[in-house]
Image: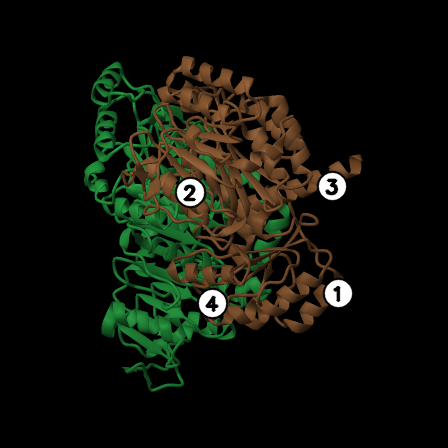
Chain colours: A green, B brown
Amino acid sequence: MSDWKSLEYFFKPKNAAIIGASNTEGSVGFTIFKNMKLALGKNAYPVNPNHEIVQGAKAFKSIKEISDQIDLAVIVTPSKTVPNILRECVEVNVKAVIIVSAGFSETGEQELTNELKKIISENPQTRVMGPNCVGVKCFETNVDTTFFAQDRMSIPKKGSLSFISQSGALGSMILDWVSKEEFGISKFASYGNAIDIDESDLIEYLCNDKDTKVITLYLEGAKDGKKFFEVAKKTTLKKPILILKGGKYDSTSQATASHTGSMAGSAKVYEAVFRQAGIINTDGMQDLFNTAKLLEKEKLPKGKRVQIITNGGGFGIIMADHIIHRGMELAQPSRKTIEELEKELPGIKISNPLDLLGDADAQRYRIAIKKCLEDKNIDILVIMCLFTLSPLKPDDIDKMLKKRRPSKTMVVIAVGGEYTEKRLEKIEKLGYTTFDYPNTAAKSLGHACWYADYLKRKKAEK
Amino acid sequence: MSDWKSLEYFFKPKNAAIIGASNTEGSVGFTIFKNMKLALGKNAYPVNPNHEIVQGAKAFKSIKEISDQIDLAVIVTPSKTVPNILRECVEVNVKAVIIVSAGFSETGEQELTNELKKIISENPQTRVMGPNCVGVKCFETNVDTTFFAQDRMSIPKKGSLSFISQSGALGSMILDWVSKEEFGISKFASYGNAIDIDESDLIEYLCNDKDTKVITLYLEGAKDGKKFFEVAKKTTLKKPILILKGGKYDSTSQATASHTGSMAGSAKVYEAVFRQAGIINTDGMQDLFNTAKLLEKEKLPKGKRVQIITNGGGFGIIMADHIIHRGMELAQPSRKTIEELEKELPGIKISNPLDLLGDADAQRYRIAIKKCLEDKNIDILVIMCLFTLSPLKPDDIDKMLKKRRPSKTMVVIAVGGEYTEKRLEKIEKLGYTTFDYPNTAAKSLGHACWYADYLKRKKAEK
């Protein structure tokens, strides 16, 4: 088992040397040094033998010239130069090295890869991430070795979701997607060819990271299946891991070999491993994103009894179908709830889905939500709002949904065009978790219930 | 079998009487008469015994006072008054009646329902839609009995997708959703309690409607299973039917009984019926919407061999997994294509997914797309664009994707935030079919392949 504490130097270094730091705007060496200067100020050192000055800072010919003890070195030089540079890093006892450079096993350069492996195995005190990776982005320290095009994507706010990805591109997409949302990211790491640090090391680190509440993972192939299983099993007892597995079939796993040089292996084997380790196995990017959002924002449900409140009959029925399809149940509200609702909502048939009818106003929603939140027979509350046919005005949302307080698991669903999208944004800002389709909400709720159930079974085993 | 031609009067009446037309802004009787006046001008007659003038037009005490022979009557009066009004419509030989009013079998008013049924069975020359429905919206004639809140939703453009729904609310959501898209609607009909005209009659009408290319349907329970099967089977040989079934499980089908008064029945039975009738069985609103878009915009694929072109390795692998999961295959390009691509794209490994690498420019995409479109070993082309890490500039899209000409089935996928969404909008405007997630694209392509295969099998049987 690796020493996860050594990974701290990647996310929280006191200083860093950027080897290949450049003056050429737009280049990888330029972007990374610029980012690191923003995070570490004078403690970010440019290394480039061809320049005296890089972006206004004195450049060093080699890392060995720097008098400070270096925590993190980032290498962005051509692949052939990397082994020698790594040797120099090891000599001066650098704690953490990120090799951004590509051109190793993924392009068939096995000899270069073996050279790196040899250096790493002889010098375990220096931990290495990569090669062929975009490295890390830490939202607490602003340490950032990614070279994402800032004019083409947005950066999310600080939060408690952390994302590990073999693929840097996937990482850029999830960050860009989260930037539209009301929740945020703690740490991102893309570890590329995983010559030293792999997904298991990163999971273990995030398991022990107090800022991380939910771990998400894009994985093509686990480097060490047994290690992965053991680490994941321990971690899921503390916090959820969501996975998206790339290369599920024989024909697609061939493609992963040329992507990150790893073998993807059989889908069925992985599925069983994930299930036994308590890992939530998402079925695509949309499912991964949505479920990450749900778990970042909501508490785990206490059970799988779902109450649906709607103002569209068919809309509620569609959700009820999805709820059952995803292994949950329609809740049976208590006698007390039914009687109180019958009294306070005359003309409304109290059932599940609870159809407040097309002319439902904010008051009707508010009564229904309040009573259902109080009912212990209900574990999950699903609020569906059809704005197109409804008398609900934009201001009614504040009356209908008070500023969210932590309570039972609850989601709000609305489907439609621009008007509806604007209403959903407002509801998100009030602290609610929203979905723009019933099926995606049900799928994510199903995952949350499965994980909550897994934890219950594990507790019972003890 | 019903005479589908009689339904023409609902969508293309030469005149219409709105019984319950009102001066009260925002009321249903106000909105419908206003809409109909816009469509038919002086040939829209308000009927209201309490007013001399409605919205500037001379009001009639009863439909019997109107001297013109009336094609369409729309009833928006309290349920108790409806039987007598319907009798009057029948007396003056109205061709088509839409009963918008609610308060019949869906609220347990069986006696009123039976009264309507008796009148209808004795007078088959008058066709009735409803009660408890929002009626029709025809994008060719502008005839519109819906009372959707125009400030809360947008209306799509004219196109070739038609939508039949037991639920009016579902209809308003699909119209609102389509309004964001680059394709349009031909006809919408919400038939409510289906006391006379049911889903089968409407399907048969749309089957014979030259403006309708794709039929979509939200169905809780078929009124007459055998009729539905026969009509659907005939129709799918001419154009695709997409269905979303509400009330798939015992516990959810109870809810449909109180929604539109129909029994939803077993999911398994319906699934088998849909499959045998060539109906595309979508699994939710998102799937229904996306597949409708794909079929409205794209030709049916000739086969299921899919070539993926991407600039993100993991991104392509995820799509490849979805493609196989949905019953399609990864295409094997011809030797000619491979050789030409190897020559024109040095440094790129020619495979499937074809990874043009993170630094792919417009030219690289253009070459790859051109060669793959020419290759007869490829039935479907999936273009994936990762904009976040890419050197592709907004203007490059025009260079990369020429204005679309009808060719083989092709979709473009990009995932991300605002920057990416803007790029996707531009690509849609060039005539391409876009998706914002790999899984939704694969699901819709899978449906299209299944339907194309169904048609092939039916042809072979002949």
Chain letter behind tag 2: B
Instruction: Point out the tag, 2 or 4, that comes first from the N-terminus.
Output: 2
Q: Is residue A247 visible?
A: no
Same subunit: marks 3 and 4: yes
**Residue beneath label 2, please?**
B36
Residues at discs 4 and 1 in contact (Cβ within 8 Å): no
Give the left or right position of residue B79, taking residue B431 as reference: left
Q: Which residue is mark 3?
A: B456
Q: From the top left corner, tell me how far across and down residue A168 is, in percent.
A: 44, 60
Residue type of the residue flagged with mark 1: Lys
* Chain assignment, label 4: B
Q: Earlier in the sequence, mark 1 or mark 2?
A: 2
Amino acid at dot 2: Met
The residue that label 1 is drawn on is: B336
> From the viewer's perspective, is B365 left or right of B44?
right
User: SS at mark 4?
Assistant: loop
User: Which mark, by number, is residue B390?
Assistant: 4
Q: Residue A450 sits in which quadrant? A: top left
Q: Position of residue A62 (x, y in %)?
A: 37, 79
Does residue B369 appear left or right of residue B115 in this picture? right
Q: Nearer the viewer, mark 3 or mark 2?
A: 2
Please tell me whether mark 1 sits on a helix, a strand or a loop: helix
Q: CA distance from mark 3 to mark 2?
A: 43 Å
Residue B58 image-quadrant placement: top left
| Residues behind callouts 1 and 2 on a single chain | yes
Closer to the chain start, of discs 3 and 4, is: 4
CB-based contact (under 8 Å), mark 3 and mark 4: no
Q: Amino acid at mark 3?
A: Lys
Q: How many angstroms separate mark 3 from mark 1 (CA)?
A: 28 Å
Kindly report the distance in space between the C-alpha atoms of the residues bearing marks 2 and 4.
51 Å
